[in-house]
Image (cartoon, grey):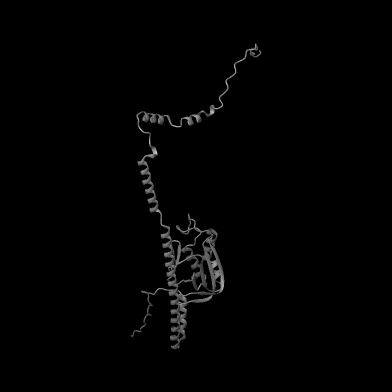
Amino acid sequence: MTSPQRPTDGATDPPAPAADPAWSMSLINNLMRTPLDPGYQAAADRRAAAGKPASTGLRSPLLIVTLVVIGACLAVAAHALRVPQAATDSRRTELIGGIRARQHDIAADSRTIDTTRRQISRLQEAALTRQHDTSLAKRLTTLELTTGSAPAHGPGLVLTVNDAAGAGTDAQGNPRTDTSDTGRLTSTDLQIVVNGLWEAGAEAVSINGQRLTTQTAIRFAGQAILVNFRALSPPYAISVIGGPGVADSFRADSGGAYLRALVSDYGIREDLATKDAVDLPAAVTAPLAHASVQPAPSTSRGGS
């Protein structure tokens, strides 16, 4: 079968009307011609038919007054919440000046204490010499060095420990302390390291110029480490007087192992240098109010 053919007797279909090229713009044209919504236009026509004036909208005096009042309230609130920068800077400068003045007073008092202590030492030595008993002077010197009440000098080492580079992030899961930063040294860290140095044979120790004695406490207060109730800032220079084997003994004992763990696990920085001469200051010890020397027991021979 062949498909049916269209007739060829000369008859043709009428041509389709040409499309309006602007038909796609009809919506835009409609919006341009009638920008007002029909509902609003009807309401405006009713107001005009009733003889009422056109709506004033934003030109209403009440609306203008309301906007001015709201703007004034916002301005007052913003000014009240804003901290005056000039007052803050003035207070900060005042606090810094006060801190520096107190530091200057402390330094002057420390120099006076050192001078007075040297004078007392000379007077004590002269008094003991006049008694022709040199053993008392030697015993006194040994006790002063042991208790830290006199400056010390001798060979030893300086162990410098510092926070990790970039320390200051929050410590989540830090096993050393729940409140410290992972890369920040804590008072517990310094306590363990110092105890390791004592165990290794140290005879005298100081941290950033603070001599350690039996009354010394290494504590953590906020972001500062307190030694002898003095706030210290990193790096912490631990000066030690001891024999030539102190450094090797420290590396081999538990204190050295703990420090190596801090370096490998938390990025703590450390540097140990042996010194031919290390100078340690005397400790500023508090006077004893309750402790005293126990008297020697008396021995009496009973008669029979």
| Residue 132 percent coordinates (x, y) | 45, 88
Vertical comparison of 150 with 33: above or below: below
**Rendered-image quadrant of the N terminus:** top right
Residue at 52% from the left image edge and 76% from the top image edge: 153
| Residue 212 percent coordinates (x, y) | 46, 71
| Residue 41 percent coordinates (x, y) | 41, 30
Give the farthest residue toward the right. 2
**Residue 93 in view:** yes
Give the farthest residue toward the left. 304
**Rendered-image quadrant of the C terminus:** bottom left
Vertical comparison of 35 with 95: above or below: above
Residue at 39% from the left image edge and 47% from the top image edge: 71
> Left or right of 135: which side holds 60?
left
Residue at 54% from the left image edge and 71% from the top image edge: 157
Viewer-nearest residue: 131 or 180:
180
**Residue 201 in view:** no
Q: Quadrant of residue 128?
A: bottom left
